Image (cartoon, grey):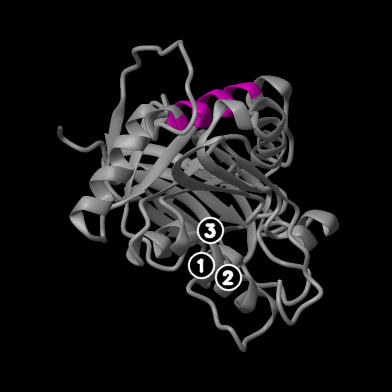
Amino acid sequence: MINTDIRLPFTLISGKEKGKTILITAGVHGAEYVGIETSKNLSRIIGPKDVTGRIIIIHTVNYSGFRERLSAVTAEDRENLNRIFPGDEKGNISQRLAYFILNSLSKKVDFYIDMHGADLHGSIRPLVFYPVAVDKEISKIAKEAAEASEFSYLVASTSRNGSYSRAALEGTPSILTELGGMGIWSKEEVDSYTEKILNVLNHLQVYSINSRKDIEITYFEPVNEIMAKEEGCWYPFFKAGDGVKKGEKIGVIKDLFDNLLGEYYSPTDGIILYQTVALSIKKEGFLSAISAIEEV
């Protein structure tokens, strides 16, 4: 990356025939290991002779966070890279990195897939976010690709400052995929993630696969993120994927002497899509994300 010491590990697969250019990134959060390993697996599986167009795979966008085993943030300035797009060409390292990803890569391709996976302290149901607070045609293209992925949970997103959501605002159809979590990875998860990304590439007509499954898709409204009002120990009452009712208690925060500090309730009928599983929680730290099922 220009004017920094950052070097992004990437694979470029250029097909013999012209077609779309697809950007795939992993490791925007450096401890989301299933996506990072999946990016490597994709580069092993996909050969130039099988590609129409080009596929660019960035294996770890936040390499310093990956190297230092950090949750969510970069090592240089402790910024959460996926919260600061569009970035700043003259800002700190994280801001310049976000600016580079957007302006030198995601704005210049035909489709963008950003692979995530719940980070060190998170548990999540496998799902895809697609943007809705963007041009209708961009949202439609992204949603159709998400539907082709064979993820069973599709979540509408109104985010504006993430890697994929900012790219969509700038005119590039984009999705954010989630699979994995809690700082671990397995071959089974990587194989499943790989298959889902290949499904998207097949849908975009840059890579062909033969087998497809008929799956039931559940559509969700934008998530309600619940944040901590106290610092202490977090005790969730449910797991990711569990259904909850509006007003139902979903967890509590206690101090180190087991005194109750705060109680947390669901703001809607819905599903807990992802949540923090760490015992320690900071004030204003993320606890849980609950989304209502969309009427289709």
**Direction from residue 204 to residue 95 in the image, left or right:** right
Disc 3 residue crowd, few under 14, some 14–19, many 20+, Cα 10 Å:
some
Q: Quadrant of residue 285?
A: bottom right
The residue positioned 15% from the left and 35% from the top of the image is: 295
Crowding at mark 1 (Cα within 10 Å: few <14, some 14-19, many 20+): many
Nearer the observer, 105 or 40: 105
Q: Does the magenta segment cover residue 19?
A: no
Mark 2 touches mark 3? (CB < 8 Å): no
> Which callout, 2 or 3, points to the residue nearer the camera?
2
Q: Which residue is label 1 attached to?
A: 102
Q: What is the distance, in whole Å, between disc 2 and disc 3 at their CAs?
A: 22 Å
65 left or right of 264 in image: right
Residue placed under numbered mark 3 in the picture: 286
The first of marks 3 and 1 along the sequence is 1
Q: Residue furthest left?
A: 296
Query: Of residues 273 and 8, which is closer to you in this image?
Result: 8
The answer to whether residue 245 is visible is no
> Which residue is located at x 73 percent, y 41 percent?
183
Secondary structure type for disc 3: strand
Q: Are marks 2 and 1 in contact (CB under 8 Å)?
A: yes
Which is more N-terminal, label 3 or label 2? Answer: 2
- Which residue is found at the position 56% from the left and 35% from the top? 16
Residue 140 position, x and y percent, is 23, 45
Instruction: Please state which amino acid type lies under the numbered disc 1.
Output: Leu
Q: Which element carries disc 2, helix, strand or loop?
A: helix
Dot label at residue 98 = 2
Q: Are marks 3 and 1 in contact (CB under 8 Å)?
A: no
User: Of circles 2 and 1, which is in front?
Assistant: 1
**Residue in view at x 45 percent, y 26 percent:** 199
Range of magenta residues: 191-201
Name the image quarter holding the C terminus: top left
Quadrant position of residue 48: top right
